[in-house]
Image: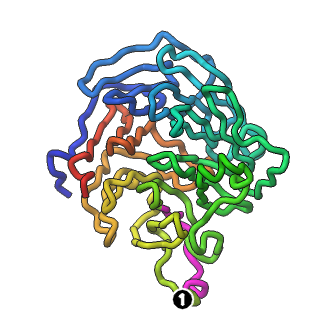
Amino acid sequence: MQRPPDLEPVHLKFTGALSLVFQGDNLVDWVAGGREFSLEGTERRSQVSYAYPFDSALDCPSGRFAVLFQRLGTKAALVDTTTAHVVREIDRSYYHASAYVFPLALWVAESGHTLLAHCPDEYNRLEIDDLDTGERLTAGADREPGDYFHSRLAVSPSGTRLLSAGWVWHPWDFVGWFDLDQVLRDPRCLDKPQVAANALHIGLAEEASAAWQTDDFLLIGSSDEPEDPEEVADLEDARRLVSPGLAVVDVRTGAVVQSVSLPHPPGAMLPVGTHEVVTFYDYPRLYRLSDGQLLHEWPDLPTGKLTSSIQHHVEPPPPIAIDTRGTRFAVSTSDSIAVVDLASRSQS
């Protein structure tokens, strides 16, 4: 397939990245102590070593903090991005921690304070901390969380909702979300996620991955597990997530408003406007949401075959940065860091 010039990757001639996040117009490898790559091709090396086998990082939209973590471990560290010094250590429950991705999210609240969502004490109990005051905003003895393994946390673009794309026993991938205004008024709202229609119907498509399209709409991707034909035949509403494929869900109602079949599960996703999406299963592909038409693909940028939060049995992907704010992505390859900018298509 011929790709137009504006979608050709820019190859930055850097190797050995351990993690990647976008920070403004630069890429930063926080696991390597804050090693920084400009999109113009210059590098700022770090003098910091964390002396711990972190393998992943995420950043805060404000750029003030980053979190280093071990995907399948119990240890993370909150880092001040101006100094690369550790502000505090973060832990999670050991329970099945070696099987699924560490649950973490950072965002800036309307107050201007930076908030952290994580599961510091129990695998199924989400907490939200104010990093500016040190206060735990969701503390309470009357919390009764359901039996849910939270993972791959993400906050909607305006910071109004929190997504958890984890799993339930035994195991079944599952996507849920929370209204953050409600949660901060009543932390018990964190104990029962809101879900899409048919989310726990085990004869239907498994909800394996998710990404915010807007504050009110969520992209949910399937696994590659087949559906039960008899269960599908009994459904009255044909608008649903299919396997393999993805669906657009209105989180205000939980209704599936759009669904499309794909030749593979999506894995991680990058929405491009409201009509297109990049999927990262195996390698990046750009699809049109209305009919699932493949618009572009980058088969020379392998990105791994992850779908679920359960990843102990799958080879880890290379460092990948997905910039939902700027509609860009970057992939570390054997001889460079490839950067693709989709901004010219993000107005659709």
Residue 225 lies in the magenta-colored region: yes
Count all numbered tags in the image, as a single digit: 1
- Residue for point 36% across, 15% down: 44
Q: In which quadrant is the N terminus drawn?
A: bottom left
Is residue 312 part of the magenta span, yes or no?
Answer: no
15 is higher (above) or lower (below) than 58:
above
In this picture, residue 89 sits left or right of residue 59: right
Query: Where does the image place residue 185, in percent across and percent down from the top left?
Result: 67, 49
Q: Which residues are magenta?
A: 220-233
Vertical placement of residue 153 versus 258, above or below: above
- Of 309 and 152, nearer the camera is 152
Residue 62 visible at all: yes
x and y percentages locating residue 206 in the rendered image: 58, 67
- Could you say where residue 41 lies in the image, as x and y percent from the top left? 26, 23
Direction top: furthest residue: 47
- Along the line of sight, the residue nearer the viewer: 107 or 263: 107
| Residue at the image position 31 percent from the left and 62 percent from the top | 275
Outermost residue on the left side: it is 5
Classify mark 1: residues with Cα within 10 Å, few (<14), some (14-19) or many (20+). few
Quadrant (top left/top right/bottom left/bottom right) for the C terminus:
bottom left
Residue 33 picture location, percent across and down: 50, 18
* Residue at the (37%, 42%) spot, across then down: 325
Instruction: Report the front residue among 309 and 273.
Output: 273
Q: Tell me the residue at 59%/54% (across/down).
A: 179
- Dot 1 corresponds to which residue? 236
Secondary structure of the residue carrying tag 1 is loop
Q: Amino acid at mark 1?
A: Glu
